[in-house]
Amino acid sequence: MLKRIFAIFVARNREFVRDRSSLAWNLLLPVALVFGLSYAFDGQRDEYTVGVLQAEAEIDTSSHPFLETRYVRFVPYESIDDAILKVERHQLDLLIEVGPPTRYWINPTAAKGYFIEFALLQSSATPSSGTIKEHVAGKPVRYADWILPGILGMNMMFSCLFGVGYVIVRYRKNGFLKRLRATPLTSLEFITAQVASRMVLIMLITTVVYTGTHLLLDTRMEGSYITLFVVGLVGAISMISMGLVVSARVTSEELAGGLLNLINWPMMMLSGVWFSLEGTGETIQRISQIFPLTHVLESARAVILDGATFTEVAPSLGAMILLSGVFLAVGAWIFRWEQY
Amino acid sequence: MEDTRPIALEARNLVKDYPGLRAVDGVSFSVPEGICFGLLGPNGAGKTTTVEIIEGVTRASSGEVCYYGEIAGSRFRQEAGIQFQNTALQDYLTVRETIQMFRSLYDRQADIDDIIEQCSLEDLLDRDNRKLSGGQRQRLLLAVALVNQPRLVFLDEPTTGLDPQARRNFWDLVQSIRAGGATIVLTTHYMDEAQVLCDDIAIMDEGKIITHGSPEELLHARYGDKLINLSHGEIRRPNLEDLFLDLTGHSLRA
């Protein structure tokens, strides 16, 4: 059994590595995106963002005139620790807890914090004597720090879904699967070899791209590299398994491409690749939890930006393992070798 | 004298239905060990579907396939070698890597150098399998079918599209495989090929076997000692092609 899995694993690796254009695309796209987006957007967050410390999910703008200020995004926070961390990292320009007495936190090294404080103090019902000001300090999270896991996760998603889903449909269409069917190879062995091959390749590529960009852009890393690697590995398995479900029966490359895009696009938009899901509606946040990419990005950012430990990301890892199990079971169950 | 060889392969009342079409309609035959069995028929007769049911790559609507007296299963997969009519191989692999990959899928493994020599692939070992000519590719596909020292070899229209030299070369290869003791099941459009290679043939049309026997028996039963007088005055003995056209008609098939 292992001999057969290894034979298919090696053959698939050779096919991938020798397809120079595909290999180059997998390596160059994420690097170009990280550098390009970092250059274009770093330090250019136009909107002011203010955290509002409160238990409720909805902000009552009538509770304080400052909360009616235009061109400011107000985001509710329940946890004071989480919110202060954001102020430290310049991800929140100011944090406010409506009183009495009203308290607020700013980072004195953040320029936008300095200006938004003026707006707060100028708001009519806020005499400066009635507020308590707190200072927090911390290194800013740059856009590059934040976007790097997003780009790597997105590249992983494309590679896992198309690199497995699309390739298996191509094998089925050109008769290669039928040829394998006539050998002692079982569908489980074939699927295992495909998952293993893509997992090794994508982890190698992601590690190379992460290391290169991390060193060149001096991106933040608060946690353990090993935990980050485990997050990537489990995430890759869950997304490969998702690709297998799509490819299990489909016989047309066009249909496979459409189905894969149907998964890719919502996942790319709703998993937090480009922007944080904080402040989005509860429904969107719930939907995002069914996507493996959401868990990959939440865990990876927690490790990179907040120094989350293995135990802290374990719930997300558990969710990804659960999703992988479901996808693999469904994929193996509905898998067919032949075209018709 | 009665044939005492064991039956290597037996098809029992195979039926394959597609929506609106019965592609295979109650096909039964048996193939004794060590012979070359030919399955002939016009396009759409159901040959390839029949063979694919036997190979296990297409599920029959009903009927069963036995290999040495047992329902064909894992032993059959280990001991059968199959050359499909149209099949793709994994891209970016060389000839040697392709043979090695398929060989690793079997418990029973032939000596790789013997296969390479037998299929005359020595000069092509490091070539990307996408860059082979038609004849070279057929030799590679045959090599892939031989990686497990098969006791039973399926060849589905193996010489379609080959030039005359490549076809003759392929016939020699098939004869050498048979001389090594393997049983061969051959489907072909070419009657000369069947006449040269096959000990026993079945002609299919519209999903059924319409006649079955050795080429000599079939020709004798149909024509006796008759000769054919051709339009330009030549007289010759009838051959399998005459028999095939007599049985399946001269009109074009859809």
Image (tube, coloured by chain):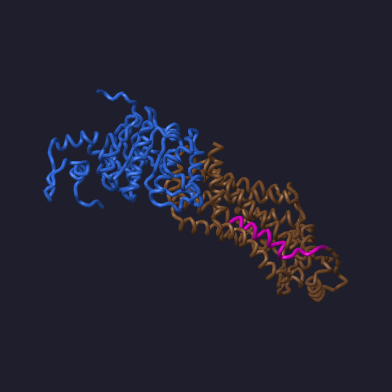
Chain colours: A brown, B blue
**How far across and down, in percent of the image, does residue A315 sit?**
69, 48
Residue B121, quarter of the rendered image: top left
Q: Residue at x 32, y 25 (%)?
A: B5
- Left or right of residue B239, residue B75 in this image: right
Asked if the magenta segment contains residue A150, the reply would be yes
- Seen from the viewer's position, the closer of residues A288 and B192 is B192
Residue A328 appears in the rendering: no
Q: Residue at x 46, y 56 (%)?
A: A253
- Left or right of residue B200, residue A51 in this image: right
Residue B243 appears in the rendering: yes
Q: Quadrant of the N terminus of chain A?
A: top right
**How far across and down, in percent of the image, does residue B50 sit?**
33, 40
**How far across and down, in percent of the image, does residue A286 sit?**
62, 56
Q: Residue at x 31, y 31 (%)?
A: B30
- Seen from the viewer's position, the closer of residues A316 and A121 is A316
Residue B194, quarter of the rendered image: top left
- Seen from the viewer's position, the closer of residues A283 and A288 is A288
* As drawn, A160 above or below B147: below
- Left or right of residue A59, residue A289 in this image: left
Q: Residue at x 69, y 54 (%)?
A: A300
- Seen from the viewer's position, the closer of residues B108 and A48 is B108
Q: Which residues are magenta?
A: A138-158
| Main secondary structure along the magenta-highlighted residues | helix
List the single residue furthest toward the front.
B123
Across the whole image, how many numbered discs are drawn on residues? 0
**How far across and down, in percent of the image, does residue B227 sit?**
13, 40
* As drawn, A39 above or below B235: below
Asked if the magenta segment contains residue B69, the reply would be no
